[in-house]
């Protein structure tokens, strides 16, 4: 049972809510708002920091207690899962450049990959320089210089 006399129980029902309980009730609303605003990511230290920024002076332990009573627990960010599989039987991709980065010294197939195409155009607005891929002739970038 409650270990309270009947007269004490009925007397407590007539008393107004204590200031501590009133403050806790207001604090629950603020903690819940901060928790939901953080998409349920913030724990008690950050929520406490948010409340301090809002000029609500409260201890971190009280924030912890209110969060526990409300059942609020921060969602933990998932850890990065490595997807590289080093232990496999697949062949390794061929090294086409073989550390020879000069177009003249590289084999024929590699030389095409290293050679690019630069084109310069004189326009009224300025000079345009366009770089494109040597194999597919796809544009890689451009630059405009004022004249």
Image (cartoon, rainbow, N blue to C red):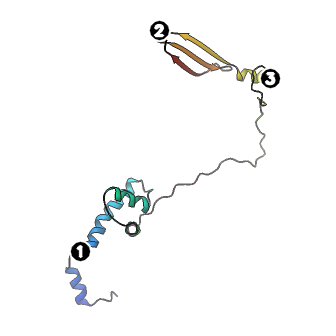
Can residue 77 be found in the magenta stretch? yes
Contact? badges 3 and 1 (CB < 8 Å): no
Q: In what element is the residue under mark 3?
A: loop
- Mark 1 residue crowding within 10 angstroms, few (<14) / some (14–19) / many (20+): few
Q: Give the range drawn in magenta.
A: 69-82
Direction bottom: furthest residue? 5
> Mark 1 or mark 2, which has the lower sequence index?
1
Relative to residue 6, is residue 105 depicted above or below? above
Q: Would you name the residue on which mark 2 appears?
A: 124
**Image quadrant where residue 3 sits:** bottom left
Instruction: Please give the residue where the numbered disc 3 appears in the rendered image.
Output: 107
Front position in the image: 70 or 46: 46
Give the crowd class for mark 2: few <14, some 14-19, many >=20 residues within 10 Å.
Answer: few
Q: How many labels does the image show?
A: 3
The residue where tag 1 is placed is 17
Q: Which mark is residue 101?
A: none
Percent from the top left, x then y, of residue 32?
Answer: 35, 60
Q: Marks 1/2: CA distance?
A: 80 Å
Numbered disc in front, either 1 or 2:
2
Residue 141 is left or right of residue 103, and the answer is: left
Task: Name which quarter of the figure residue 132 lies in.
Answer: top right
The reply to whether the magenta stretch includes residue 117 is: no
Q: Is residue 22 above or below residue 87?
A: below
State the CA–CA distance, disc 3 to disc 1: 87 Å
């Amino acid at each position: 049972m409650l270990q309270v006399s009947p007269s004490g129980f009925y007397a407590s029902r007539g008393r107004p809510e204590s200031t501590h309980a009133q403050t806790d009730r207001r604090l629950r609303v603020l903690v819940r708002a901060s928790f939901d605003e953080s998409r349920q990511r913030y724990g008690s230290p950050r929520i406490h920091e948010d409340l301090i920024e809002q000029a609500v002076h409260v201890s971190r332990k009280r924030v912890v207690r209110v969060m526990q009573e409300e059942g609020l627990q921060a969602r933990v960010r998932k850890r990065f899962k490595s997807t590289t599989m080093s232990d496999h039987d697949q062949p390794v991709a061929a090294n086409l450049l073989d550390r020879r980065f000069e177009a003249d010294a590289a084999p024929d197939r590699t030389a095409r990959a290293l050679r690019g195409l630069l084109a310069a155009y004189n326009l009224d607005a300025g000079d345009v320089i366009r770089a494109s891929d040597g194999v597919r002739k796809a544009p890689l970038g451009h630059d405009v210089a004022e004249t």
